[in-house]
Amino acid sequence: MLMNTPREALGAERLDALRKELKARGLDGFVIPISDEHMSEYVGGYAQRLAWLTGFGGSAGTAVVLTDPAPQPAAAIFVDGRYTLQVRDQVDGRLYAYESIPQTSVAKWLEAHAPDGAVIGYDAWLHGVKWAETVDRALAGKGGKLVAVDSNPVDAVWQDRPAPSAAPALVHPDELAGESSEAKRAAVSEWLAGKSLDAVVITALDSIAWLLNIRGTDVERTPVALSYVIARADGTADLFVAEEKVTPQLRQHLGNSVNIQPRDRFVPGLEELAGKRVSVDPERAVGAIFTVLRGCGATVIEERDPTVLPKAIKNPVEQQGHRDAQKRDGGAVSRFLHWLSVEAPKGGVTELSAAAQLEAFRKAGSDLRDLSFDTISGAGPNGAVVHYRVAEETNRTLEPGMVYLIDSGGQYPSGTTDITRTVWIGPGEPAAEIRDRFTRVLKGHIALAMAVFPKGTAGSQLDVLARQALWQAGLDYAHGTGHGVGSFLSVHEGPQRIAKSAGAQGGTDQELMPGMFLSNEPGYYKTGEYGIRIENLVLVEPRTIEGAEGEYYGFETLTHVPIERKLVDRAILNDVEIGWWNAYHAHVLDVIGPQLDGGAKAWLKAQCAPL
């Protein structure tokens, strides 16, 4: 492929500009992650440095650029299995070597490719402290070192970089939160006192939003406000937020116990903790915070952010709010699938127009504030790209005889939704192989949905249930099976996960606890042909078992949308699985049926008929 398109030429131009900037600073290389000062998964436009430099549009990835372009490779981009295909579509392979996580890492790559004695720069406001220690050790082995830059060199050459959002922070009412901010801060205060700590630094945006019962519009698809919090053992807190975001409603909501300060006062605020015992979460706080605290004489205690677990365990109000959101969302998605069944076989629907139509159905309902992530709308081979992001250059028409995968969600004040459906674009019958693969994914989905497990079980212990039918045919998928979901917050929320115990998207030892939301989303992807994924959200709930020795849990399925019956090979399902299918669809009809009428309602009844 010749470099003859404007986008490719622009990528080379930007890479060259960055190398000149690195050389002027005396650096032999620089590391560029997808990250912001809060270690967010999704970041605002001002922090999209990797996308600007390379063209990569995924939500997880890192690039390394060496200043001297002569050694080959002189730059690399690192992604996990979700983005193996996407990165090749979006990033010029003559400029960047493609590297796969966890098979390699930035540290291993620099150890192999950085020149001896190399000085590699990084922005300490974008990386965790453990990451920096690992990379520095790797470079030290060849006489090099990792150094924190005073300002980000990408910003120096990004001439039209957008400013951070100035939108006001919003109050999230207690009747939706289910608990007041005062009560949550009191729990944090008790936690600090129990560990003989003076304060905790909270930097994860969803943690701040949960703790203070505030939301915002600073990051697309995630309703958070750019800010920092220092919470103290006496129950007070400092909120560092740009002054233009502060409204009279926010001040009244937070009251006198929360001291609102300008965002640029955060570093001085950290320095005022000199001599104090301060908790910081190394998984969620950037390395620069550790440097400032240690430099001023504070004693840094590494502990998990105390809001993470209570945020993950939804209270009854949040649970019911989510059910309400799922009911509205299920109606919108069902209307869309009916529309798709009528329009797609005509040949005029594209990935982009389908995604736009689904968003329109969601907006036509009540209370949609945003999508919960960019809709994954993949027809045929594009569906095999796990986190595919449709663009004009890749937009496909949904053609008869094609598998179509759509993964989407909505942000409602009462809850966050996430659902994937894979459908067959008729007329005609899907090939036996496609039906086999779909049904094996379905068997895994059902096995996980029906799981009963003892207290103390981690998601990694359940992951095999979703994969076993695929493994029996020598098949697998390169992503986790389930992630946590927030309450009008992040669509990907920890600490719970259902995944293999190793790898970049690996599992966690966090036990599953009643009140936790998770996704149930096994899949299968045949490169160049099609992708399959079936995703519902579930709630961990207690299970009453006669004669049980100890506490046992199971899942309540929260998502109410029919699953594509044309792709099911009934002969592969056993009686228990068919029973689950029929019960699930009977429930879908009960919940969604009253919302539909006319052709859409007739379609729903046909989709929900017993298998």
Image (cartoon, rainbow, N blue to C red):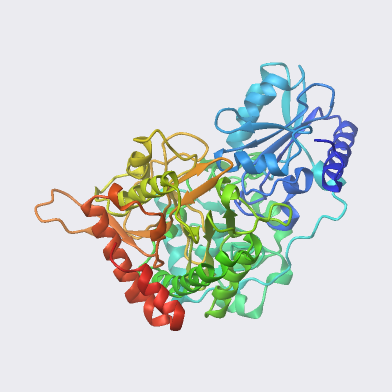
Image quarter of residue 27: top right
Most distant residue in the front direction = 428
- The answer, for residue 219, to whether it is visible in the render is no
Q: Nearer the viewer, residue 370 or 429?
A: 429
Image location of residue 167, percent across then percent down: 70, 70
Residue 348, relative to residue 79: is it above or below?
below
Q: Nearer the viewer, residue 349 or 11?
A: 349
Image location of residue 567, percent across then percent down: 41, 54
Image location of residue 125, percent across then percent down: 69, 45
Residue 57, relative to residue 326: is it above or below?
above
Does 405 sit left or right of 118 as displayed?
A: left
Q: Nearer the viewer, residue 436 or 3?
A: 436
Does 83 sit left or right of 465 as displayed?
A: right
Residue for point 49% across, 42% down:
479
Residue 123, relative to residue 540: is it above or below?
above
Most distant residue in the left direction = 547
